[in-house]
Amino acid sequence: MIGRALATTGILALGLATTACGTSGAAAQEVRTGGPAHAAVAPAAQGTAQTSGQTQTSGQTSASGGTMRQRPLAGKIVVVDPGHNGANYRHPDVINRQVNVITQKKACDTTGTETASGYTEPAFNWDVSQRLAKILEAKGAKVTLTREGNNGVGPCITKRAAIGNAAKADAVLSVHADGSAPSNKGFHVILPKKINGPVDPVVGKSKRLGIDVRDAVRKGTGLPYSTYIGADALSFRSDIGGLNLSTVPKVLFEAGNMKNPGDAAKFQSAAFRQKLAESLANGIQNYLK
Ligand SMILES: [Zn+2]
């Protein structure tokens, strides 16, 4: 999906990958692969496994027995993966590098999409992910984010998967928003399929995680199921690198369509993003309990 502002600034001439990585199969074919990219991930994308603030401290038990209810995720490891990165559009040599995701080769990352008013998907993903990490930490989980901010590039989808694997995460959630035809709306969750690859052993757990996240988002936000992808807001795919390469339970959440005025208005509300983050946390908690 080609961002309007990006097009007007001539970025397309650089051969950027401009789709949201969670776009439908047809839309994904619009990805600009550009020339043979060669650069490794930029320094900003290295060493991206950084815990977000304080991690779990204590409180697994207490004399009153109440702490487990207050910190229901104590002892759990959750990786939150904010899709794309704010400066990806300036580093086509990095993000267009082709990587092996078992079922195909594809770009290391893409720019993500944006609303008509220019609110970018990387910014949205980053904001929701930070809110989510804070809520999960308050519940006692140890949380790792796959990138440090929203001004860098990458990491590659392969690295994002590796971060979750290395953390031995109990659950990984990638946070995205889609870019589709303006009349399309609603959220969906992308789940892995068996591909005769690394993700196969956790396909079942990932499905449970995805259903719990879906149910919590529906209940907590009132967002409608996607009108254009999947069935009952679930879409099983074998072309998503971050899922194919995961050896821990993982799903990719697509909050809705940034090109749809109704969805976009919600995404641009901080109160909505907080409600969404709380709902995502509830879904993860329901899965982990
Ligand atoms: Zn995306």
Image: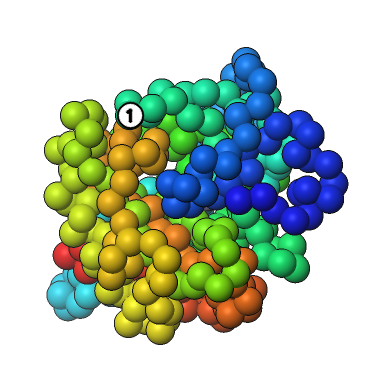
The residue labelled by disc 1 is 103
Height in image: 12 above or below 99? below
221 left or right of 45 in image: left
The residue drawn where x is 33% and y is 67% is: 233
Whether residue 44 is situated above or below residue 24 in the rendered picture = above
Q: Where does the image place residue 40, in percent across and percent down from the top left?
A: 59, 19
Q: Which color scheme is applied? A: rainbow
How many residues crowd mark 1 within 10 Å: few (<14), some (14–19), many (20+)?
A: some
Which quarter of the figure has residue 260?
bottom right
Query: Can the viewer see residue 27?
Result: yes
| Quadrant position of residue 13 | top right
Q: Where residue 106 appears, x then y in whole percent?
A: 48, 30
Q: Does label 1 point to a residue whose CB lies under 8 Å from ligand 1?
A: no
The residue sitting at 31% across, 56% down in the picture is: 235
User: Label 1 sits on what residue type?
Assistant: Thr
Q: Nearer the viewer, residue 205 or 97?
A: 97
**Rendered residue at 37%/74% (across/down):** 225
Where is residue 264? Give x, y as percent. Answer: 61, 73
Q: Position of residue 147 (x, y in %)?
A: 54, 43
Residue occupying image coordinates x 47% and y 66%: 255
